[in-house]
Amino acid sequence: MSDRVVNGIHELTENVSASPYWNHDIAPTTAAARKWGTWDIAALWVGMSVCNPTYMLAGTMIAVGMTWWQSVLTILLGNLIVLIPMVLNAHPGTKYGIPFPVYCRASFGVLGSNVPAILRAIVACGWFGIQTWLGGFATYTLMLAIYPGIAGWGTLPAWLGINVGQLACFLVFWLVNMIIIWRGMESIRFLEDVSAPFLIIVGVGLLGWAYWRAGGLGPMFSSGGGGNFWAVFPAQLTAMVGFWATLSLNIPDFSRFARTQKDQILGQTYGLPSTMTLYSFVGVAVTSACLVIPGYSRFRNEEMLNPASLACKLAAATDPLSAHLAAAVTENTRELIGKAAAAPTDAPAPDGLAPALAALLNERIADPSLYEPGRFAGVALDPALRADLAAPPADAEGKLRLNRRLLEAAYPGDVVQQNLWDPVTVCGRFENPIVVAFAILALWIATLTTNLAANVVSPANDISNLAPRLISFRTGGMITGVVGILMMPWKLLASTQGYIFTWLIGYGALLGPIGGILIADYFVLRSKRLRLADLYRKGGTYWYQGGFNERAILALLLGVLPNIPGFLAAAFPGWVTTANGKCLIPGFFVSTYQYAWFVGFAISFVSYILLMAEGALAGPAEPSEQPAGAAGKTTAAAPDSAGPSEVPGPAAASSPSAPRPGGAGQSGSGAIEFGG
């Protein structure tokens, strides 16, 4: 026997350390190293889910026509769907203690596993660089609030595109990531455990602050809309599944440390859907509240801040709202022009006039006649705004909020909101240095917990799998970090903000076929049984032809190809659009791409089973359970010792086809086994 089994958890007893495809970091986890319980797995998901992209998720859905509750429910449904492959792919990690690239060896081959592993690593490296830059830039933005001098630290070559302060914040945040990854998985577990309750408290605290400052949850929660729901729902649901599609592949990198299957299943079920839904709701609620909090919107045209220009514009309008606002402004125009003339000559006009205009409007809003409902009978107002006019606030700040909303309702084309979906923007308006410092800490922890777990652990293992004898987990992590700097993520975001996230999330959706192959191989064809030692052995069960399973590669291509045209249309529209605006991609492929993850998963799942069904898969018989006390007593066998005895699985007994050369392998025990 090369496996010892206790409570369904396998521990390798055979010594395969001489194999060139083994190193300490990708070796099966020992019983002593399994320290992750239900809380640890749940905390992992809290830490990964609380991040800027999650905060902004619902906003992208509201922007295309959903209501706030439709967007939140879509996020919940998408995470419940992706939870299924997440739990399934976590199973072999927990049962056998193997990381993602070693798990891929069973279906793709010992060497072929590098294909899905590197595909996964590419998107992880991209996200690592971007998340690290966002963490560093958030630090820089908030530092400006308490130390404006950071902007003048010095200059860098123009081609670099950033200043010294920005580069310093980026490198400091990058260094913190590297220190933690150098210390290993236990440091990551500790960080996730400690940060999870802190991040939940921060989210609830931000929600409470917004509710208090806005006097409610804002207009998004009382507006109608949602008539476009079914038109945008498929694409938004697929994007939501694609959000964690990459993690649904490499989840064995974490589940290998779980004590039991129950721990990984309950931990993921508790941690993933609930946190994603809650934090996206926080994003909606805080953004909605900020729409009516003074100071979170600005005029698109500087002339809007000139009271004389504004008065003329209002006076020339014919609608009742503009006419009424004109009466509130023109009365004091001369006074304001005099104030502007007395302002310092080196002060830009908007800076000198904005406070005066705000003071005027704030003063005039106290006129009770402004709130007479009849004045707005012919004006199309938001229901929440009309309700507030019917029962105007008594406090000065409430009146200021109402005034601002009236002005924005009169001229929506001249007033734009700041990027209120970005929590950095919201926190950047804080003025108290202590509050700003706390916001920096919260954003650091939120970005760290996501970046380390989601974007460093996977490529570190994947790169190590390329040459296990030369590249350790630490070295793979350092390589990921260097790539994150060399890609200059600030340039990517500056030049491709419009589609970089479409590209990365879309790329994640294209990895659905890998999930289909892994699940089909492990659950359908192998009935959850693997030869643990052969995953590290040349010439063993999973060597196939020269280390590659060509049928798995073919199934992967079959699943990816139908989605490539739609992916190009979504991520690089300029490439596939003619001068007159016509898309060269047929509509069928564009529509299919809305379901990219599902389509790719299904095609590869079915095609892999059919391609492998020419012969029989003989899974190893489960080794006998060992007494619980024997779990820690591991006796290493010789490198060439025989594996566990095997009997043909159910597929072998019922299959009429005999294995063919090039597709069959013979185990050390003499049992014929096709394709793994």
Image: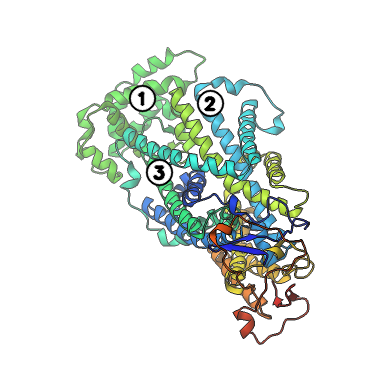
What residue is shown at x 64% (from left), y 53% (from top)?
A: 574
**Pointer 1: what residue?**
358
**Residue 333 point in image, percent of width and height:** 34, 21
Locate residue 479 relative to residue 140 in the image: left or right.
right
In which quadrant is the C terminus drawn?
A: bottom right
Say few, some or many: other residues with alpha carbon within 10 Å of mark 1 (under 14 / 14 to 19 / 20 or more). Answer: some
Residue type marked 1: Ala
Q: What secondary structure is found at the residue carrying circle 3?
A: helix
Q: Image quadrant of residue 288? A: top left
Query: Marks 3 and 2, how far apart in space?
Result: 24 Å
Residue picked out by circle 2: 143
Residue depicted at x 28% and y 43%:
384
- Can you say whether 616 is above or below 557 in the image? below
The residue at which mark 3 appears reads as 282
Please provide percent x and percent y for residue 443: 50, 36
Q: Earlier in the sequence, mark 1 or mark 3?
A: 3
**Residue nearest the viewer, comparing 448 with 196:** 196
Quarter of the image for residue 256 reads bottom right
Contact between labelled residues 3 and 1, with CB atoms less than 8 Å apart = no
Residue 653, given in percent of the width and then of the height, sits at 62, 84
Relative height, residue 410 to residue 155 (above, below): below
Question: In the rendered structure, which amino acid carries the disc numbered 3?
Answer: Val
Whether residue 459 is visible, yes or no, is yes
> Sequence order check: which comes first, mark 3 or mark 2?
2
